[in-house]
Amino acid sequence: MGVPPASFAAVPLEARPELVENSAAALSHTQPGVWFTINDSGNDPWLFALDTTGRDRGVWRVGGASNVDWESASVGPCAPPTAAAVADTSGPASGECVFIGDTGDNDAKRPSRVIYRVAEPKAAQAGFTGEVTAQSLIYSYADGPHDVEAMYVAPNADIYLITKRRLADAAGRMRPALVFRLAAEAWRPGVPAIAQIVDSLPIVPGSAPLRIVTDAALSPDARYLAVRTYAQVFVFVTDPLTGRVINGIPPAVCNTMTTGEWGGEGITWFGRGAALLMTAEGRESPMYVVDCPMPRRDE
């Protein structure tokens, strides 16, 4: 099950009444201490901002979007960086967007799903309400429908999606979690995209109690990927340009059951260090800051 966190702390949330089923967590790269979250399925299309002290930092209605089964969120570049921006490492390569994944599909029967992106709003004071406008990307998986709650956006603006539930091969053997990719260029108006399988992770959903994949978050420097299940956090080494997991380096595994917080789903980075922020679904549930082990990079 992994090693317990070196430390953990519960931080109360001063959440808005509209946040009824906290289902994700996505750290801003440009607004220190600010992170975003969403409600789960069937709720109004709200995007919430909070900070790492648990304070409300505003809510925005997402125009042009509907919440069928919102399950994932990530912050990343709105478009691929230009060659000039890659050469200039002094700041972000392009504008930042919040990506909202209508990726849930409990029965794996929906032929297509939707990802929305909005320009990252500026965090405001408690009580603020605004509106943002979304672009949408309709997509399907190359091998048929999947239930997905884990999504992250790489520095090159590619989107990665990780399957949640137990999968079986033709012989009935359990398969590892699959990783699908949507290229940054997939955002073409009116053209549905196909998410292609590019990898699998050494996490086998269903192979142990509570082992289903509920969220993922790329570190701010894109060197590590945290993948959450209900009982564990797996931290992988990644390529900092593409966000792809580097195979051959075992992940560090953290047993979060020891914190008493196993019913939540969201995970993001607490800042630019190694600490992680985990969320629970209830509006009055606190967030947890945990210090999990990190894998060694061969550099």
Image (cartoon, rainbow, N blue to C red):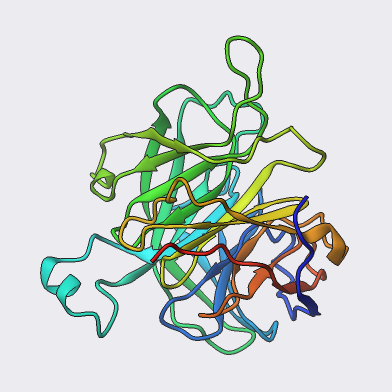
The vertical placement of 104 against 121, above or below, is: above
The vertical placement of 9 against 4, above or below, is: below
Residue 188 horizontal side relative to residue 178, left or right: left
- Tell me which residue sits at (45%, 42%) in the image: 114
- Tell me which residue sits at (44%, 50%) in the image: 245
The residue nearer to you, when weighing 172 against 184, is 172
The residue nearer to you, when weighing 93 against 237, is 237
- Tell me which residue sits at (52%, 45%) in the image: 102
- Count of numbered marks: 0
Quarter of the picture holding the C terminus: bottom left
Q: Quadrant of residue 83?
A: bottom left
Q: Residue furthest bottom?
A: 125
Residue 213: % across, % down = 65, 45
Residue 97 horizontal side relative to residue 105, left or right: left
Q: Residue furthest left?
A: 84
The residue nearer to you, when weighing 266 against 244, is 244
